[in-house]
Image (tube, grey):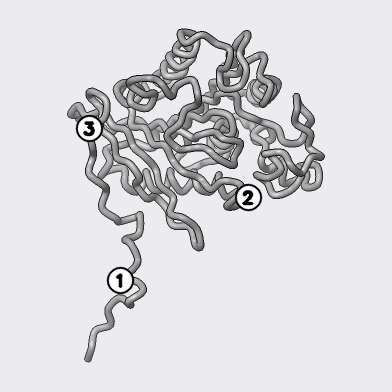
Amino acid sequence: MTATGPSLRELIAAPHPDHAPLPPAAPSEPGVHELRGVPYAEVEGGRPLELDLWMPRASRTAPLPLVLFVHGGAWRRGRRDDMGMRTRHWAPGPFARIAAEGFAVACADYRLSGEATFPAPLDDLRAALRWLTLRSAELGVDTSRTIVWGESAGGHLASLLALTHAEPPLGGAVIWYGPSDLTTARGRFAPEDAATPEALMIGTAPAAAPERARAASPLTHAHADAPPFLLVHGEQDTMVDCSHSQSLTSALENAGSPVELRTVQHADHGWHGLADDQVEGLFTHSLAFAHRLVG
């Protein structure tokens, strides 16, 4: 009797991310090492989804808390390892700085609006958390102490993840100038316009699909058991009106969930208009918030 082995198609395929070997860690900034381009999910008919990891090199006896970073780019572009234009010149970079403070940092791909529409990008972030939890012992991370941190469109997705993900529940959210409401005209955004980044993300003008727009709006998901939020927004933001963070703050407060709002005078989107030391201060404040939540 001949044993049946894997098919040729199965042999040709790359190992599934659930059990594929991790790439070797490479030294990064002092005290930090990186794992770049780690596949975490396979998408039928699409590119493999990958994440980058920054880890402190110091020996440790307990698993690390995790920062899951979600990049911006109007849901249509962007790089997973980019915290925004005002941090690109930092040395050490922002993720190495977070890792040096005792966190593991994962920066995950998600499908952009030219590849798939909502809820695909949110599903991808859930898949990243699933993979990080599955491989947590190997990585030395504790995903029950996850802080999701996002900027701009990534702040929108990070808010949704924090408000809707149940297992494991997130420990908190740091949201920089993220949209919270796709149903109401705010600033330059008009829900009737089918050409906006928001419309491209959900697949149609939000006004033409109100239930889909509500499902994609963090504002509608505020609830009493939400993790603590830090919302940071420029008062002169010309791309995502500051009222997005103000309204989400009110919704979380009304639900009885802990939230801190910090609005920034003279700041446009991406912290344009601020001095370097002010941007550093916002980063330091956000990192301190994350530290308080994970103990």
Give the numbered dot on residue 218: none
At 46% from the left edge and 55% from the top edge, which residue is drawn? 47
Answer whether residue 258 is visible to the viewer in this image: no
Q: Gap in Å between the C-alphas at discs 3 and 2?
A: 37 Å
- Please state which of residues 10 and 132 is positioned toward the viewer in this rendering: 10
- Please state which of residues 235 and 260 is positioned toward the viewer in this rendering: 235
User: Which x, y percent locates residue 46?
Assistant: 50, 58
Q: Residues within 10 Å of mark 2 (few under 14, many from 20)?
A: some
Mark 1 or 2 closer to N-term? 1
The residue labelled by disc 1 is 11
User: Which x, y percent locates residue 138?
Assistant: 25, 44
- Please state which of residues 2 and 198 is positioned toward the viewer in this rendering: 198
Indicate whether 96 appears above or below 113: above
The residue labelled by disc 2 is 117
User: Which x, y percent locates residue 149?
Assistant: 48, 29
Q: Circles 1 and 2: CB distance less than 8 Å? A: no
Q: Amino acid at mark 3?
A: Pro
Q: Amino acid at mark 2?
A: Thr
Quadrant assignment for the N terminus: bottom left
User: Which x, y percent locates residue 126?
Assistant: 49, 45
Q: Residues within 10 Å of mark 1 (few under 14, many from 20)?
A: few
Mark 3 or 2 closer to N-term? 3
Indicate whether 235 appears above or below 116: above
Q: Amino acid at mark 1?
A: Leu
* Residue reaching furthest to the left: 59
Q: Quadrant of residue 246?
A: top right
Q: Secondary structure at mark 3?
A: strand
* Residue reaching furthest to the bottom: 1
Answer whether residue 108 is visible to the viewer in this image: yes
Q: Quadrant of residue 161?
A: top right
Give the numbered dot on residue 27: 3
